[in-house]
Image (cartoon, rainbow, N blue to C red):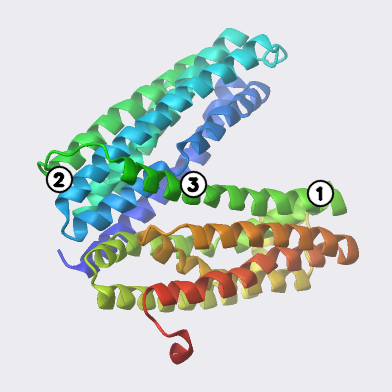
Amino acid sequence: MSTKKNIIFNGIASVGSKGVRVAEQLLLVPFFLSAWGAAYYGEWLTLAIIPSVLAFSDLGLGTAASNSFVLAYTGGDKQKAAVVFKTGLTIVSWAVLFGIVLSFFVMILAYYGGFLNKSLIPPSDAIASLVFMMGSKLVNFYNQIFEAFYRAKERAASAINIGTLESLTCIIVGIFVLQKGGGVVAYASSIMVVSFVYKIVYAIVGLKLIGVMDKASFSKELAKDILKKGFGFLLSPIWQAIYFQGSTFVVRLALGAEAVAVFNTVRTLCRSVNQIYNLINQSVFPEFQIAVGAKDIHKAKKMFNNSMKIVLVAAFFGVVFLCLVGPRVYAWWTKDQLVVSDNVWCVFMIGVLFNAVWWTSEIVYRAMNKPYRFTICGTVSACISTLVSYYLSCEMGMIGATIGYVVLDILMVFLVVPKAFGLLGINVIRRL
């Protein structure tokens, strides 16, 4: 199948995946509220924070191992790819074991520390549902390692579609359980069963795609490399948490709760354009990494340049659209309860344009399995942006918070984009 067709199929699959995930977030809420009530549902959401944090104990190992496998396999070194798979599977299993031990101590602390006593959910039910939710999260650690098979065989769309079917099944099963009067234990256990079944299917289909691999043994050297790069990928959710949660926190400190509502809602609406970039990146990335692994740099350059052009055009029209109708959409969305100035709106629009450039370059670092430049720059920029937001919020109000927020987008353009071009052998000055 041609690269263009693969990119189109990847795009269609990504759109379907996002649509189902949005539906998962929206459709289940009325059923939760109807079955459990608002207070009980709120307790459930609070409880779900614990397994969500557990996802960080993956340490980025699956991503690092997955990228190493694809680069080795598409580069023609099938034996190395087999060693990467064996090594990656082993260290991801270590991470799962670490997650199990960590989960055990967290639940012991929560139960005997009395943290669950004041909850509307009985402590025994809370612990049981935590076990099932953590089981669902832990089995997801294997996603990346098996996804590598699909990407290496140019079947990334199939991997996305299986994930979409899993989410769709979770919605159907969840609604069924809630309508039948199931509580937190029934709901969490049913979702865990769905996760386990789909992961088994995901692994079997992936192994059939890749075929019989040469016998391989665990490699300490590769394990060290995966651990090192895995930590680099771990920095990505960390800097994003600093950036998004940090900016919200400083606005709350400097300007108050109502300002947080305005800041976050405007940010959410403006970042709707970013979803287009994500779809483009998700569509292009599998084929781009195959070209990088096969050392077809000319093809990789072409895909990257075309992606950058498409993203910039999408960003331009997205900004124009938001400038023309955004304020009216925002007023309708918030029922005229929140007011935002034109200056704040314009600064957010500037950030959208800068974001289009640097976020597209992220696929270069991920495809080449070189996360540190991107994630370290992201972490430093997030810290600077948060501090600037706080200082300018105190001095200038909401417009100051917005300027500080956009500082990250401006810094990242200069810190990560030139290096991304350099990794592909593109002369930035000549391109300009």
Q: CA distance from mark 3 to mark 1?
A: 31 Å
Residue hosting label 3: 231
Q: Secondary structure at mark 3?
A: helix
Q: Residue at x 19, y 35 (%)?
A: 204
One can see residue 425 in this view: yes
Q: Amino acid at mark 1?
A: Arg
Q: Residue at x 65, y 23 (%)?
A: 43
Q: CA distance from mark 2 to mark 1?
A: 51 Å
The mark lying in front, picked from 3 and 1, is: 3
The mark lying in front, picked from 3 and 2, is: 3
Q: Residue at x 23, y 49 (%)?
A: 150
Residue hosting label 1: 252
Alpha-carbon neighbours of circle 2 within 10 Å: few (<14), some, or many (≥20)? some
Q: Earlier in the sequence, mark 3 or mark 2?
A: 2
Q: Amino acid at mark 2?
A: Leu
Q: Secondary structure at mark 2?
A: helix
Q: Amino acid at mark 3?
A: Phe
| Side of 294 relative to 326 (left or right) | left
Residue hosting label 2: 209
Depth check, front residue: 127 or 180: 127
- Horizontal and vertical percent position of residue 319: 58, 74
- Horizontal and vertical percent position of residue 383: 70, 57
The mark lying in front, picked from 2 and 1, is: 2
- Horizontal and vertical percent position of residue 335: 72, 53
Q: Earlier in the sequence, mark 2 or mark 1?
A: 2
